Image (tube, rainbow, N blue to C red):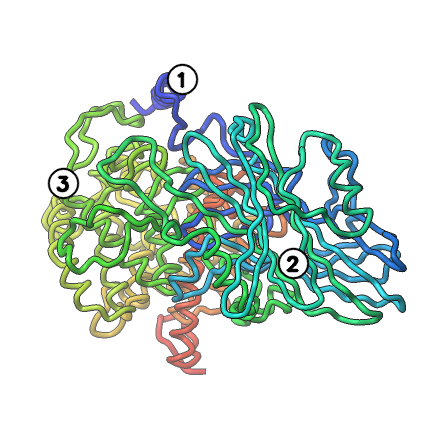
């Protein structure tokens, strides 16, 4: 039956694409290509994101929850104008591009005169203006602040500009920020868009800017750009220009006197097949050899309602919708926003966290694309509704695998939430608890086996809570490759996460609420214990997160070295799996698995970890690419499945955390370093870490959630620091250094 999977997938893909007119939850035919252009994204948690490239373009948009659009909007640019002795001596778009539009502008900035640095949620670009003795520094800051739920949900980003004039002449410097209505989609040309200037004062501070209203039949939104006013800075604006033309009018307007001819009126609604752009300008009155105080641009998003595609009994509203667009901007950027996130002047991002500075610095804070909380008008009906104070919380598995709360993956990624925004993690768990109790008896065909089975069985953990392009939370399990009611890992991962969350939050209310759900899913899991020995058996298909790697029976230790892959009769039954200690990893993260709470003998665990390090790490790609999922005992890669020869970055970081817990610090850091250097230095996948790659640099599923397990390494390092440094000898006994 498995041989018919490609045919069944193709038939399902055609029906989904051409009949239902919707995108597949996993599109294996039109996968997102790798573009080595992306820098740190803009935006807070849950309010949409816009990604800028390292060269400054606005090139990836997620203004609707979970749905990504890849389009570079050329008109969205910063331009600098330098004037001396009453004349413009230099005017340049700060972009390397030479586009076919707006050819009246001066494009093609010299790339070797600018340097980009990023450490999420910050990025900064330094521009050395050729022949001007002027240095500009643009610092990009998003309000991603651990344990701060209010400010972290603001849908905005800040550009802080520093100007250093090293010449001996009086200089007037202008920075112009241009934006086009929309995000580069077909709706940009639908007509009806309009812009307006605004001015807002509060507590002695003022901001001025332009609001760009993108008016479409569905998902209308407003983008606002604003500048903080202060002495020595002049703000001017233009509410419209034609981004499809040469751009001479606005370019000459700036060139003439370094300012724009501001008007207080709104621009007229655009006609069909036309677009508009809004422009904001600030001017520094700069003396010779002086460092100006920073000036701040803000870009903010306001969206009235972001509904899902099917009309639900309730509407989903983003947290920021209760705030008017003017008020979104004013409270945040007026009061030295750059001081909220400190240490942005550090140039080398690897120097930020010493214990593992060579590991993925972009994942020190959770990436933008996988956290998206949304408020629900209707009350949350779960186990104890009166105790639910958080809105629905969802995370997407990645930019290509479009499913909310892919739970087998969240098992690894959840460390980012529980350590940085623990209430969001608890909210997600309440959502999953409610989903456990749901059932959907509608029969559907599963693509791998071809059998018909219910969409969702009661008292089992769902694979996901739905497709963001459908009706999530109501229609569970967008994943249709396997019937995950028979998966062996989901129920157990729920229980482990519940206790881990309790261990880290000490919330007895949460534990009491989760207890009956844990009992229900454990009872469901025990039906897989076929011989009554308390150990469940895999069922001879890919019935766990490795959904392309068949597993049969339980897993037992080989003589003194490691745990066999399974107890089946396939040739790979004794392969060395890099993820074989995942359960023990979570026990250690919960403060268990040692002494009285020991489940796996420590000597066995340490022996397995050392075997993995010697085979899956050191014998794979010369030890430079992390740990391969499967390795044969003779040191050859397990090629028995499409996933056994892959490296899963999130699994590797979890493995590294387990090594650190067991005192194998050097081995853990070296294992994780291979993934970081492969993704960031060899493959150029900055801010789009994939789910997997192979030795031949083939990768799968960009911008995936599982690699957030890097936070488990930080947790292990923190615990090691509290307990004191230790080494582990060959018998698995820790010895103090």
Q: Secondary structure at mark 1?
A: helix
Other-residue count near label 3 (Cα within 10 Å), few / some / many at <14 / 14–19 / ≥20: some
Task: Please tell me whether residue 643 is drawn above or below residue 225 in the rendered image.
Answer: above
Mark 1 in CB contact with mark 3 (< 8 angstroms): no
Q: Earlier in the sequence, mark 3 or mark 2?
A: 2
Residue 18 tag number: 1
Q: Secondary structure at mark 3?
A: loop
Residue nearer the viewer, 359 or 609: 359
Residue nearer the viewer, 201 or 246: 201
Q: Which of the 4 image quadrants contains residue 485?
A: top left
Locate residue 163 relative to residue 366 in the image: left or right. Answer: right
* Residue 611 shows in this picture: no
| Distance between the alpha carbons at the discs numbered 1 and 3 | 32 Å
Percent coordinates x, y for residue 275 in the rendering:
60, 31
Q: Which of the 4 image quadrants contains residue 473?
A: top left
Pointer 2 residue: 117
Locate residue 679 relative to residue 177 in the image: left or right. Answer: left
Percent coordinates x, y for residue 715 in the rendering:
39, 68
Other-residue count near label 1 (Cα within 10 Å), few / some / many at <14 / 14–19 / ≥20: few
Q: Earlier in the sequence, mark 1 or mark 3?
A: 1
Percent coordinates x, y for residue 69 in the rendering:
51, 36
* Residue 125 shows in this picture: yes
| Distance between the alpha carbons at the discs numbered 3 and 2 | 49 Å
Which is more foreground, mark 3 or mark 2? 2
| Distance between the alpha carbons at the discs numbered 2 and 1 | 43 Å
Pointer 3 residue: 458
Percent coordinates x, y for residue 467 in the rendering:
33, 36
Q: Secondary structure at mark 2?
A: strand
Locate residue 677 relative to residue 648 in the image: left or right. Answer: right
Task: Please tell me whether residue 50 is drawn above or below residue 26 in the rendered image.
Answer: below
């Amino acid at each position: 039956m498995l041989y018919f999977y490609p045919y069944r997938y193709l038939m399902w893909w055609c029906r989904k694409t051409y009949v239902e007119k919707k995108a597949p939850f996993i599109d294996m035919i039109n996968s997102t290509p790798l573009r080595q252009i992306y820098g740190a994204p803009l935006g807070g948690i849950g309010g949409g994101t816009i990604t800028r490239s390292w060269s400054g373009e606005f090139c990836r948009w997620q203004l609707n929850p979970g749905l990504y659009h890849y389009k570079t909007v050329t008109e969205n640019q910063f331009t600098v104008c330098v004037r001396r002795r009453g004349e413009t001596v230099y005017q340049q778009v700060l972009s390397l591009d030479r586009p076919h539009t707006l050819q009246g502008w001066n494009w093609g900035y010299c790339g070797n005169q600018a340097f980009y640095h990023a450490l999420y949620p910050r990025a900064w670009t330094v521009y050395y203006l050729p022949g001007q003795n002027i240095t500009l520094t643009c610092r990009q800051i998003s309000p991603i602040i651990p344990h701060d739920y209010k400010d972290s949900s603001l849908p905005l980003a800040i550009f802080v500009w520093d100007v250093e004039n090293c010449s001996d002449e009086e200089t007037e410097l202008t920075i112009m920020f241009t934006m086009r209505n929309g995000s580069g989609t077909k709706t940009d040309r639908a007509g009806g868009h309009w812009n307006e200037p605004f001015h807002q004062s509060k507590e002695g501070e003022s901001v001025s800017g332009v609001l760009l209203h993108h008016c479409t039949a569905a998902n209308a939104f407003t983008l606002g750009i604003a500048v903080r006013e202060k002495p020595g800075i002049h703000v001017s604006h233009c509410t419209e220009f034609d981004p499809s033309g040469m751009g001479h009018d606005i370019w000459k307007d700036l060139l003439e006197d370094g300012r724009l001819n501001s008007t207080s009126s709104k621009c007229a609604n655009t006609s069909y097949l036309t677009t508009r752009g809004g422009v904001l300008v600030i001017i520094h009155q700069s003396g010779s050899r002086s460092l100006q105080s920073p000036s701040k641009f803000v870009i903010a998003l306001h969206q009235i309602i972001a509904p899902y595609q099917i009309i639900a009994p309730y509407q989903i509203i983003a947290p920021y919708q209760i705030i008017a667009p003017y008020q979104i901007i004013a409270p945040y950027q007026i009061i030295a926003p750059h001081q909220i996130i400190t240490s942005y002047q550090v140039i080398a991002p690897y120097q930020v966290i010493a214990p593992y500075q060579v590991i993925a610095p972009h994942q020190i804070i959770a990436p933008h694309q996988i956290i998206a909380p949304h408020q629900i008008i209707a009350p949350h009906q779960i186990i104890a509704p009166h105790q639910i104070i958080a809105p629905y919380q969802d995370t997407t598995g990645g930019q290509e695998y479009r499913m909310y709360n892919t739970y087998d993956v969240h098992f690894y990624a959840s460390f980012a939430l529980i350590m940085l925004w623990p209430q969001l993690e608890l909210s997600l768990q309440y959502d999953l608890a409610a989903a456990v109790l749901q059932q959907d008896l509608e029969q559907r065909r599963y693509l791998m086996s071809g059998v018909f089975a219910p969409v969702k069985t009661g008292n089992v953990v769902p694979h996901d809570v739905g497709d963001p392009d459908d009706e999530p939370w109501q229609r569970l399990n967008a994943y249709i490759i396997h019937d995950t009611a028979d998966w062996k890992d989901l129920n157990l991962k729920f229980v482990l996460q519940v206790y881990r969350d309790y261990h880290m939050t000490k919330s007895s209310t949460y534990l009491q609420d989760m207890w009956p759900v844990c009992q229900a899913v454990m009872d469901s899991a025990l039906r897989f214990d076929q011989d009554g020995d308390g150990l469940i058996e895999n069922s001879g298909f890919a019935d766990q997160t490795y959904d392309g790697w068949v597993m049969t029976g339980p897993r037992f230790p080989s003589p003194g070295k490691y745990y066999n892959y399974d107890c089946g009769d396939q040739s790979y039954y004794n392969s060395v799996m890099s993820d074989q200690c995942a359960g023990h990893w979570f026990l250690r993260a919960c403060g268990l698995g040692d002494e009285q709470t020991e489940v796996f003998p420590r000597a066995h665990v340490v022996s397995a970890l050392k075997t993995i390090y010697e085979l899956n790490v050191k014998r794979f790609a010369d030890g430079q690419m992390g740990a391969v999922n499967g390795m044969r005992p003779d040191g050859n890669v397990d090629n028995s499945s499409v996933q056994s020869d892959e490296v899963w970055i999130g699994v590797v970081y979890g493995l590294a955390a387990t090594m650190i817990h067991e005192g194998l610090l050097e081995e853990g850091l070296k294992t994780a370093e291979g993934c970081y250097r492969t993704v960031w230095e060899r493959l150029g996948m900055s801010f789009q870490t994939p789910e997997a790659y192979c030795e031949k640099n083939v990768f799968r599923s960009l911008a995936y959630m599982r690699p957030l397990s890097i936070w488990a390494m930080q947790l292990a390092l923190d615990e090691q620091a509290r307990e004191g440094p230790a080494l582990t000898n060959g018998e698995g006994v820790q010895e103090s250094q």
